[in-house]
Amino acid sequence: MGFAHGGRHPLPDPAELASRLSKAGIGSNARIIAYDDQGGMNASRLWWLLRYMGHEQVYVMDEGFSAWQNAKFPVTTDVPVQIPSSFEVNVQPQMLASLEDVQQASADASSVLIDSRDARRFAGLEEPIDAKAGHIPGALNYFWKDVLGAEGRWTGALEERFNKLDKDGAIIVYCGSGVSACPNVIALEEAGYSNVKLYSGSWSDWISYEENPVAAGEK
């Protein structure tokens, strides 16, 4: 059985996204604060995507929209007037891991592979979304939600969380489709790791190639 290459959430074309951002009034000098109500997962994907396109002034709001509402800060349903601007693209290819990069890392441990899904999906005990269960051979499991504390705030113990990893080594992070991996990418950067890439197609892309091996269990 064949599956679509590229994963469930393929990256947009940078030029097309830049055009849409420009039309929405978001220019290259804009300071962007991303938030969601999903524990920061989708906001982190936007953070990564904008950084990949070369935009440095992007941040993720701690705790998200629900915390904003709980604090009784103002909300609105008004749609802001959009004054077109100019968003310039400067793609950062070093932030993105290719399928070939991941295949090599799996084969020879040249990069650390981090799987951001929960432990049961990693172990292959259940798979509610994708067509195959398991994980990429050689990957380590760091569930993305563990970057958050009990109240949904980003934890301050990120260096401790990743202390078994070499800060000078290459790291490739994936999940099911390249979204929930992004909080781990941010957490690794905050913990002082500088050579971190996202495998954007992630597990859903990996299993679309019949020749790629699949592992199960806790390791």
Image (spheres, rainbow, N blue to C red):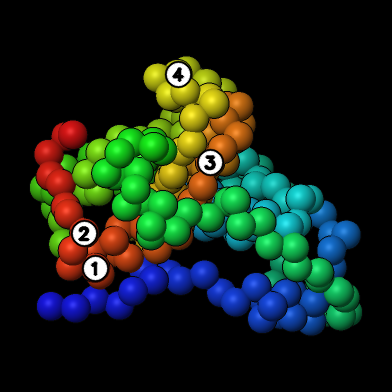
Q: Quadrant of the N terminus?
A: bottom left
Mark 4 or 2, closer to the camera: 2
Mark nearer the N terminus (3 vs 2) = 3
Mark nearer the N terminus (3 vs 1) = 3
Residue marked by disc 2 = 212
Q: Within 10 angstroms of label 1, few (less than 14), some, or many (20 or more) residues?
A: some
Cα distance, mark 4 to mark 2?
30 Å
User: Where is residue 129, by image quadrant?
Assistant: bottom left
Q: Nearer the viewer, residue 44 or 101?
A: 101
Cα distance, mark 1 to mark 4?
33 Å
Residue marked by disc 3 = 196
Q: Amino acid at mark 1?
A: Tyr
Q: Within 10 angstroms of label 2, few (less than 14), some, or many (20 or more) residues?
A: few
Residue at image position (76%, 50%) is 56
Residue at image position (79%, 81%) is 23
Cα distance, mark 3 to mark 4?
15 Å
Q: Are marks 1 and 2 in contact (CB under 8 Å)?
A: yes
Residue marked by disc 4 = 163
Q: In the rendering, at what x and y percent does residue 27 appear?
A: 84, 68
Q: Within 10 angstroms of label 4, few (less than 14), some, or many (20 or more) residues?
A: few
Q: Quadrant of the C terminus?
A: top left
Q: Secondary structure at mark 1?
A: loop
Q: Please determine whether, in this image, residue 30 is positioned above or below residue 164.
A: below
Residue at image position (24%, 68%) is 209
Q: Amino acid at mark 3?
A: Val
Count of all numbered marks drawn on residues in the image: 4
Q: Amino acid at mark 2?
A: Asn
User: Where is residue 154, by image quadrant?
Assistant: top right
